[in-house]
């Protein structure tokens, strides 16, 4: 086990939990946080939530769960080389998308629009709500009672208005300070993971074409390298050989550039890290390549008419669910109806955000008197996209 660097987060010196807890004899504080996240209900729901493709458009596409596991793998590899706390980085990576709504960004955007009069909806803030308030696993308190450092890492973005309500956790957004290096690594590991797996899923779906991808610098040069090394290889194997090389270059560049930045900044404590500019970064050349790739994916995959058509229908579901529950809270399960009495519309947003894709489709069909055959299709096949209105 590599020695933890002085600039890393130290579980023995955590800023602590919201509620006092005895320490474990066998696990560090950050290990315990990782374990609490893996065992929570919201984590299991990630299996049935959209990353880009609606869950069950195909069994091989990424879901939020497999995405989160890939982020954790990349983040841990980088953390180990940089001598950061691997457990903290893993905890943040596994929890970073817990607040995501069904149907990916379309669901989040629609819920944000519905909630505009009541403070809007931000999925990062919702991830924090899940671990701070919505999970119900402890006798003495709501939430998972995670360490400050884990919560700091989960809250990647936050509007100034919301930051003001979050006490010491919100301070950094107002003071423009950074989180731990572990949080910064998890953030860029997220970007590496989705850029690469979205290429893989995009090609698999037929929405992206290999010939067009070759025009993107990062993909093009690694595809050429893969063909050079294996002239006979084609199809899926060529795609995988290319993506493996891309991930390796991105992670290697991230580690090298970050170590250089850490050394140049001369930071020797987590507080010095928080006061310094962002230190986890790609080299300028790789950053430019990554931006080019992102633009390509936006134009050719995320904005593809077939993806947009599914997302438009998904938004309609979220919108209708919100307004039906708001019009008649008796449509909600008892526990959630009581929360509406206590905290108003936010309780409806919490309920919808927690839904899996197929649960949202089934619930929409139930409330709108949907065709029983389509309802059965959702139950039996989990065929969410087929049953969208
Ligand atoms: Mg993510």
Image (cartoon, rainbow, N blue to C red):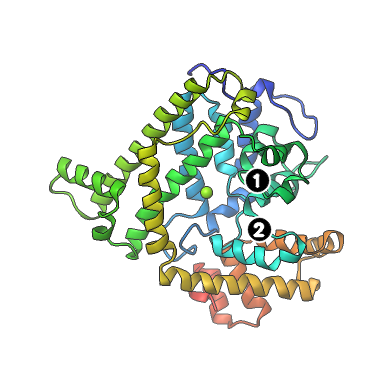
What residue appears at the point 22 percent right and 55 percent down from the top-left corner? Answer: 235
What residue appears at the point 51 percent right and 35 percent down from the top-left corner? Answer: 185
Q: Is residue 209 above or below residue 374?
A: above
Q: Which residue is mark 1?
A: 40
Q: Is residue 337 above or below residue 197?
A: below
Q: How many marks?
A: 2
The answer to whether mark 2 and mark 1 are in CB contact below 8 A is no
Residue 317 is labelled as none
Give the image location of residue 52, x and y in percent: 47, 60
Q: Residues within 10 Å of mark 2 (few under 14, many from 20)?
A: many
Residue 354 is labelled as 2
Q: Nearer the viewer, residue 387 or 266?
A: 266
Q: Earlier in the sequence, mark 2 or mark 1?
A: 1
Give the image location of residue 245, x and y in percent: 30, 40
Residue 384 appears in the figure: no
Question: How far is mark 2 from mark 1, CA to CA?
Answer: 12 Å
Q: Is residue 157 above or below residue 10?
A: below
Quarter in which the C terminus is drawn: bottom right
């Amino acid at each position: 086990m590599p020695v933890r660097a002085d600039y890393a987060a130290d579980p023995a010196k955590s800023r602590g939990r919201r509620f006092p807890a005895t320490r474990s004899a066998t696990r560090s504080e950050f290990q315990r946080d990782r374990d609490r996240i893996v065992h929570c209900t919201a984590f299991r729901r990630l299996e049935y939530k959209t990353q880009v493709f609606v869950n069950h458009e195909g069994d091989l596409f990424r879901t939020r769960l497999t995405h989160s596991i890939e982020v954790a793998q990349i983040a841990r590899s980088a953390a180990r080389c940089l001598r950061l706390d691997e457990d903290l980085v893993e905890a943040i990576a596994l929890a970073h998308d817990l607040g995501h709504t069904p149907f990916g960004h379309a669901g989040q955007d629609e819920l944000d629009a519905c909630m505009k009069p009541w403070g809007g909806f931000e999925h990062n803030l919702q991830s924090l709500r899940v671990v701070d308030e919505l999970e119900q696993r402890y006798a003495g308190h709501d939430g998972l009672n995670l360490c400050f450092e884990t919560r700091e890492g989960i809250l990647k973005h936050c509007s100034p208005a919301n930051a003001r309500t979050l006490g010491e956790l919100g301070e950094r957004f107002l003071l423009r300070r950074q989180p731990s290096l572990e949080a910064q690594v998890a953030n860029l590991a997220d970007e590496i993971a989705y850029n690469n797996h979205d290429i893989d899923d995009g090609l698999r779906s037929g929405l992206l074409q290999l010939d067009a991808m070759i025009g993107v610098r990062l993909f093009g040069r690694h595809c050429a390298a893969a063909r050079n090394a294996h002239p006979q290889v084609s199809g899926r194997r060529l795609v995988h050989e290319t993506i493996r090389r891309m991930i390796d270059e991105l992670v290697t560049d991230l580690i090298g550039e970050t170590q250089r930045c850490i050394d140049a900044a001369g930071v020797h404590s987590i507080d010095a890290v928080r006061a310094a500019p962002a230190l986890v970064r790609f080299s300028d050349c790789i950053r430019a390549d990554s931006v080019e790739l992102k633009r390509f994916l936006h134009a050719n995959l995320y904005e593809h008419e077939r993806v947009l058509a599914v997302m438009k229908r998904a938004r309609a579901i979220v919108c209708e669910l919100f307004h039906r529950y708001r019009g008649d809270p008796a449509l909600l399960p008892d526990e959630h109806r009581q929360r509406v009495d206590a905290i108003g519309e936010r309780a409806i947003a919490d309920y919808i955000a927690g839904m899996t894709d197929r649960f949202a489709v089934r619930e929409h069909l139930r409330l709108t008197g949907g065709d029983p055959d389509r309802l059965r299709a959702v139950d039996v096949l989990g065929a969410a996209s087929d049953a969208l209105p």
